[in-house]
Image (tube, grey):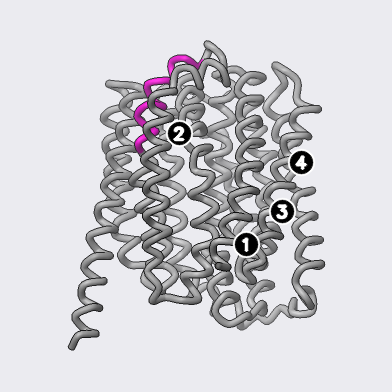
Amino acid sequence: MNLAKNSLWLLLARIGAQGMAALFTILLARRLGSAGFGEYALIAAIIFIGNMLTTFGTDMSIIREIASHDDLSLLPASLSIQLVLSLLFILVIWFDASLLPHQGTDGILALRVYSFVLIPLSFFTVFSSALRGKQLIAAYAWLNLIGSFLQLAIIWFFLRAGERLVTLAILLLFSQALITLVGALICSFTIQGFWRDWVFTIKDVPKLIKVSAPLALLALIAMVYQKSSVILLSIISGPVLTGWFSVAQRSVEATKTAHAAVLTALYPAMAQNKKETFHLSWMFLLLGAGIGAITLSVLATPLTLILFGSEYEASVPALQILAWVLIPYTISTFLTLKFVASNQETPVLRASLVSLAILAVSSIWWIPRAGLSGASSSVLIAESTQAGLLFLQWRARYEFSELLREA
């Protein structure tokens, strides 16, 4: 009952947040143009990977710790790790951003400015992880909804057509700082004695690093895997093709609203009850993925033209292919959470490395020959491979555990 309630809260919030995220994407795509949006997509991909790298898996670790033992003592250690890694990543960006191909002076400066968003994101990750670990899903849902609204409102009123990417970076940095402040206030009001437990102990840092290292590796591989197509397209083909692909990819992301809501609520529940199968939730998610894939593939042309305009019509074939990623994505994400909640990261690591290698090799070979279709097909093949490998490993472990119980 609690899982269903949490999933419903998250679903309602995700619908609102994803609706505003869709408007945000449409707004940027139309005001920046395909080339400008392609440059922004590369910047966002780099910062997205940087955020996962600097989080170092500590978010999943503290969610698991809070859900299992109601222990908030590791929050200061998590924040300190993230802040140190964020500062290091920012230094790398400032010194090496000029090495990126197909990026103008404005794009490089925008990346350098936007890299500072990792600092408020470190605080935001700690606050949101505390809410999820405590299973205060309504508060977590409101935090995401308010965050999406603030970001959209700031961009809507202050970003004009043809504006420089540096202006966009400053606005996004400011909006994330406000969202982080909201997160701090929500935690203060919803978690009793939240700040009282903030006692930094240096011995907690190596302890948390050791526990989080496998999760950090998994998160980094997953994020590189998720954003590698955008990065490779930008390097091989330039910003225009990257902009078209990003529009198709963002459209598919918007259809994952219900899945993201249920899966976000499932992880703490899995950590609490490791023997529960959650088969009903899995079947519901797979059914929704199938319906979403068919709908998105059939309506790809009118959706693209209505939402983004004729400038992005070339992204339709990519959207029709990427729509079918929803099915293997559902399998992969569910089984990944199941393995991680049970402290079994190795199967996920194996599947992730294999699928990342397949994605990289097929993209490098296929993008110069087939452009957007090659990039999209590479993603579908890699995602299907990952889902298949995870399923085989889960089935083998499940059958083995059944044999042990019978013995």
Q: Indicate the secondary structure of the residue bearing disc 2.
A: helix
Q: Which residue is at a point 43% across and 58% down the rendered structure image?
A: 281
Q: To which residue does mark 4 refer?
A: 150
Q: To which residue does mark 3 refer?
A: 143
Q: What crowding class fits label 3: few (fewer than 14 Cα within 10 Å), some (14-19), or many (20 or more)?
A: many
Q: Could you tell me residue 208's position as x and y percent? A: 55, 75
Q: Earlier in the sequence, mark 3 or mark 1?
A: 1
Q: What crowding class fits label 1: few (fewer than 14 Cα within 10 Å), some (14-19), or many (20 or more)?
A: many
As drawn, the label of residue 352 is none
Looking at the picture, which amino acid does disc 2 mark? Val
Task: Give the residues drawn in magenta, as a range.
Answer: 312-324
Q: To which residue does mark 2 refer?
A: 230
Q: CA distance from mark 3 to mark 4?
A: 11 Å
Q: To which residue does mark 1 refer?
A: 82
Q: Indicate the secondary structure of the residue bearing disc 1.
A: helix
Q: Nearer the viewer, mark 4 or mark 1?
A: 4
Q: Which residue is at a point 74% across and 76% down the rendered structure image?
A: 198
Looking at the picture, which amino acid does disc 4 mark? Leu
Q: Earlier in the sequence, mark 2 or mark 3?
A: 3
**Disc 3 and disc 4 in contact, CB within 8 angstroms:** no
Q: Indicate the secondary structure of the residue bearing disc 3.
A: helix
Q: Earlier in the sequence, mark 4 or mark 2?
A: 4
374 and 39: which one is in front? Answer: 374
